[in-house]
Image (spheres, rainbow, N blue to C red):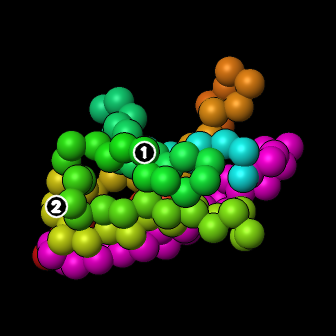
Amino acid sequence: QVQLVESGGGLVQPGGSLTLSCVASGFAFDMYPMAWYRQVPGKERELVAAVSDDGSPSRYGDSVKGRFAISRDNSKNTVHLRMHSLKIEDTARYYCDVHLYGVNYWGQGTQVTVSS
């Protein structure tokens, strides 16, 4: 079955950096776009970044443009999110996402907390 396992979250000070990773299994990873979303309790999920099947970045959320970078390694079924110049408002749970056959799949997420 489809599995997405996120990792790399943690506590970081404002201005710091983190890299999130997502390992995917259960589907033909190199044929599908992948995305990172984030969610804060009580709010809707927000698109952070998306990457096409061949690794071309497709789009970024307005709030992270110029600070975050998405990439993928199809040989390892992995997608990364490199986050720089982190702000307090980036605090959220981050989820790796894939849309397959009309269904969105995501993992358990990884918590990112930006705080001094």
Instruction: Please state, as top left, top right, bottom left or bottom right, where the C terminus lies in the image.
Output: bottom left
The secondary structure type at the circle numbered 1 is strand
The amino acid at mark 2 is Ile
Residue 47, position in %: x, y? 38, 40
**Residue 88: assigned label:** 2
Occupied quadrant, residue 72: bottom right
The residue carrying pointer 1 sits among few (fewer than 14), some (14 to 19) or many (20 or more) residues within 10 Å by Cα, namely some
Residue 112, position in %: x, y? 36, 63
Report the residue at 79% width, 55% height from top. Answer: 25
Q: Is residue 102 visible?
A: yes
- Please report the bounds of the magenta region as a residue range: 1-29
Residue 84, position in %: x, y? 25, 72
Report the residue at 35% width, 30% height from top. Answer: 44
The stretch drawn in magenta includes residue 4: yes
**Residue 58: assigned label:** 1
The answer for how far apart the CA atoms under marks 1 and 2 are is: 25 Å
